[in-house]
Amino acid sequence: MTTAAFSNLGLDAAMLANLDSMGYQSMTPVQAQSLPVILQGNDLIAQAETGSGKTAAFGIGLLTRLNARHFKVQSLVLCPTRELADQVGKEIRRLASAIANVKLLTLCGGVPFGPQLGSLEHGAHIIVGTPGRVLKHLRKGSLKLSQLKTLVLDEADRMLDMGFYEDMAEIVAATPGTRQTLLFSATYPEAIKQISASMQKKPSRISVAATHTPNKIEQVFFEVAGHGHSQIREQRLAALVTLLGHYHPASCVIFCNTKQQCQNIADMLQAKGYSALALHGDLEQRDRDQVLVRFSNQSCSILVATDVAARGLDIKDLAAVINFELSQDPEVHVHRIGRTGRAGKAGLALSLFIAAESYRVNAIEDYQQSPTKTAAIDALHIDNKHDFSPPMVTLCIDGGRKSKVRPGDILGALTGESGIAGTHVGKIDIFDQLAYVAIARSSAAQALEVLSTRKVKGRYFKARQLE
């Protein structure tokens, strides 16, 4: 383990002694990969899960660059929620205990603004906060970032999920071009590539989580019996219900070959009590937006889609893909199932076929250069006691960008005096006229009351729950 020793990094003796007292005997994989890059002053994209030791990695980095005698804000860490900001702030304070007179302030919404103003007047070296509140202080002039050396975007994918891109961009615009920018994200979707391109300079990229690999996906084919188009269709529908009842995936995309098939299956599943929505080319843009919002924020468990409609769909932690019918193109099949089993997680791909489609199964085997696993649908057992309710509920607010509603306004209204935990607030999506926020099911009624009876952005908006 000598190669993973902190002593190999050239850190000063006080920092090494402090790390030892904190129980940091050797570096975690993300620390071992990222710290050499960070300590050289280079920009970094690190794909790493929560609990990987990333806070210590960027904490050590920003403290190494800090000049405690220079009483200006030199480091800024942006976090998606108040809870994470508090956690990060505590960890950096522990890491900084070996350095005299380091002042760290946490700036988050949901708490009074006045005391933060007073604290900022006395100066700080390090700010840890949420984008909405940090931006509010920037606009007010109470926070200045002209001397910033290090910017950290922690859980950047979650901040993007919550709709903070514009806030982040405005904050970054107020920082010097000479800053070091460290971006940490559990996933690496297209949006993260775009944010890196606009905010970083030639970043090194490291990953401690394996991206999608075929062997992470359990793939099973089920033959459906029946004669005649109508009977086969009924058998397919029955088999689909059996698959859902046996595997009960937390999130699932069901692929169909036609728009009409999509709608029919979604209607059938809804009638059986499943949380299912259809995504196809006949939807109006507003309806399509709502479907994608609800599925991506975990307030709908099942998306029934055509290949064309699902193009560009990027859903994290998709538990399963079900092919109601096989695609005629084996490459499309592999693309379909590749939407599960990402970021090092296990995935599940289930496919229905009839005997006359066996040639398609053979074509998939040839394309993948590996044999397929076939199982009997009759061997599966439906768990009738399983609760298929999704964990989140979507609330729709009749105010969006045109009303200057920002994610921080919604988050602040929900987590302020109302006492709703930030961890119960999920993805926030802002459109021109509407805003959507995902709320944990247990807090949905309280959140709806808050948004319906209290001011957001200084005015009242209508709010409703999407069903």
Image: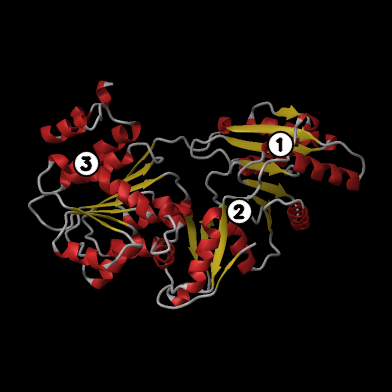
Q: Secondary structure at mark 2?
A: loop
Left or right position of 166 against 248? left
Q: Which mark is residue 311?
A: 2
The residue that appears at 78% across and 33% down in the rendered structure is 377
Q: Can you say which quadrant of the picture contains the C terminus?
A: bottom right
In the image, residue 92 sits, relative to residue 345, either above or below, namely below
Q: Earlier in the sequence, mark 2 or mark 3?
A: 3
Foreground of the two, 314 or 455:
455
Identity, as a three-letter code, of the amino acid under mark 1: His
Tag 2 near tag 3, CB within 8 Å: no
Identity, as a three-letter code, of the amino acid under mark 3: Arg
Query: Residue 318, image x and y in percent?
Result: 57, 44
Q: Secondary structure at mark 3?
A: helix
Identity, as a three-letter code, of the amino acid under mark 2: Arg
Query: Residue 343, image x and y in percent?
Result: 49, 39
Query: Residue 198, image x and y in percent?
Result: 35, 58
The residue that appears at 7% across and 52% down in the rendered structure is 69
Q: Which mark is residue 94?
A: 3
Q: Quadrant of residue 320?
A: top right
| Mark 3: few/some/many CA within 10 Å (<14, 14-19, 20+) | some
